[in-house]
Image (spheres, helix red, strand yellow):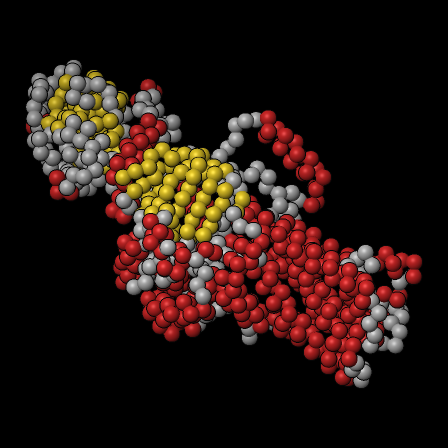
Amino acid sequence: MTNLLVTEDIVLVENVYKQYQMFKGVRMRHAVQEALKFMREQSKRKANPEQRFVLKDVSFRMKQGETLGLIGHNGSGKTTLMRLLAGVSLPTQGRIRVVGRVQPLLSLGAGFHNELTGRQNIYLNCTLMGLDISQTKDRIEQIIAFADIGDYIDVPVKRYSSGMLSRVGFAAAVHMNAEIVLIDEVMAVGDYSFNVKSTAAIREYIKHGTVVLVSHDVNTMERICERVIWLDHGEVRADGQATQVLHDYTQSQQRKVVAASPIVPPPAEATVQPTAPTADRVMVNRDRFDLDVTIQKVSVLNREGEDKNEFAFDDVLLIRAEIEFAMPKADVRITVGIVDIDTKAVITLCDNQLLKSSGSLHGRVEVEARFPNLKLRPRNYGVRVGIADLNALKPLDVWTDVSPRFYFTGERHIPEQHLFQPQIDLIFTPGVSMKYINSNAPQDTAPPVAALETSPKA
Amino acid sequence: MGYSVKHGAASSPYIFEAENNHLKRGLWGHLAFAFHYWPFFTYWVRRSIITRYSATSVGLLWAIFQPLLSSLVYLFVFSLVMRVNTGTVPYGLFIITSMVLWTYLNRIIFSGASSVITNLDIITRVRFPREFLPLAVVAESLVDLFFGMIIVAVVFVITGHPITPYMLLAIWPFLALTAFALGLGFIFAGLTSSVRDLLQVLPILIQLSLYLTPVIYPITAVPEAVQSLFIINPLAPIFSAWQETLLYGQFTLAGPLLISTIVSLIVLVLGYLFFKRSEWHFADRL
């Protein structure tokens, strides 16, 4: 009998649809009016076959001890699915079967009452989770020891600090030994020492119990879950081995983000109106200091010189900038950088050669920076191009893509040490070169194709 | 460490099985599930009582003063201004005895209805028998009633009111009233998810029904022709029987009271089933 139960699915979700009723309730004050309105809407909705489902045909099973991750954008139905699993909401269609007690680890201290002491609240919380008196008494001392807040345990919780409250709430939650635990974002609780303890407790749970984890943190999820379900607008887009699903998910997110930030052409009147508001190019930050120097366009290209925003792990990346010098300028330095959107770290490349050149730049100048085989982490990157006057030691024009401009795809399992890890304003970039092309500047020392030495950006 | 699933997985009440907007569980299933959470109920009631009567709150005083104050108002209106004839019993004694029971009813219906809204944080997160919330209100109200009855007993002793064996029969109208009030509490609690301003309207409805029920006046003050209509109100025989047994030392309303009791039980069962049906709207709509 018990052996049968072990092999049984502990969670069964079969073709589940969930639709929140449009009917949000009436007010007695306008009872007749609202009832009529509701009936009208009802009949209209019947005529309209397109209904909004929060969950659409979701099916999966979980075995005892499995750890499942749920991932998806905001509003993809993760919370609704968690509510169905917690048993506080019913599926509009389809079947759900959950065997055992479900402990939601979403909000610690739910149901705590201010006037009661910590100990009384723990008793209440344990029984709320369906434990009987003897089971509660068995673990109350463990919980108190875990929370470790000393004499405060017999003080009404209204005198607690928020840290103490979450300690008690967490301690109670992890000692329930529920068959299924729902975790919404693995949270850090309390100070450092408690944090270590709570993380260890969650690990222990994950090792032995059946866990459903909702998170936006792909890295955490990959560490913890064997299996991940990707929800997209209420539908299961992928269900399978964590690494694969998370990889697909990240790629799709990156693609979406880059597609959403169009390459903004700089307005032509920028040279005339230097102080013109830059609101129309939300994605690009411009800091203009000299009206005579304008960065016209920055493009990200592949090896063949085609516009691209998706690069393989070890692809060659070219960044080309078009700069307009209205007046001849000498002693300028141009820097081209790659900005890590997440960490704001920049890999900068600059043309030291021009330091030595006496010639001046005039008219349209194109600069191309070449980044071969950077081995950057697969994620989104932006671009920064800057021009500075070396004599006056001041910048002339700076162009920064603060939104993602391109991204690297690639295996997620590259050992850390093989990855290029940019630091803030990192300057040493081996094997990177920079050249001037198509320059109609009247200078004579423009290096045609020179692998420039890299040096500090200033 | 006990990360086993022995006790939980094998015991059926913890299985949650739902299909096509229906929980696969009948009336007995609900009751069995509730039975498993009985320890929670006892702690929940204890919690409510502690918080209501804790030293920092004026709960106990309020429990006594609420019926006492309204009694004083009605005493002024009906014994000095309007002169209601309460027979051999002084009006003051009459009104305090009735008012204690009315406060009990009032509290079960209103606090029972609002218990869902006030405990929304656990309702939307954890599965437990939600019927315990209105039920716990009954337990709390019993404590209030107990203190109220002490006041009544004190007044009886001071005025030298005769103690009769009929007083024991007062338990019957009391039980019928409890069933009726709890049933209504269930119904109104279930309605709070669809009628949003119910909690604002409810006190007015309760106040109106006070005047339609022989609480602040005896049923004998009502003209004979209308009295038969009063039997339609299931509360009328209950309150009349309460007053008869405690104040007049007689019991003449067994028939109407029996009908009231049956109606009350029907209201209780239907109210419970309605509540169990609408409890799923709480997390979805509120």
Q: Is residue A182 above or below residue B57?
A: above
Can see residue A147?
yes
Is residue A334 shown left or right of residue B249? left
Residue beneath the point at 80% across and 71% down: B243
Viewport quadrant of the C terminus of chain A: top left
User: How many tags in the picture?
Assistant: 0
Q: Is residue A325 above or below residue A132?
A: above
Viewport quadrant of the N terminus of chain A: bottom left
Q: In the rendering, at what x and y percent does residue A100 appear?
A: 41, 54
Q: Quadrant of residue A26?
A: top right
Closer to the camera, A413 or A241? A241
Residue beneath the point at 69% across and 45% down: A28
Q: In the rendering, at what x and y percent does residue B156 appear?
A: 77, 81
Q: Is residue A257 above or below residue A144?
A: above
Residue beneath the point at 66% across and 60% down: B182
Can see residue A118?
no
Name the residue furthest front: A1
Residue beneath the point at 12% across and 39% down: A418
Closer to the camera, B210 or A235? A235
Is residue A130 shown left or right of residue B139? left
Q: In the rendering, at what x and y percent does residue A116 appear?
A: 48, 69
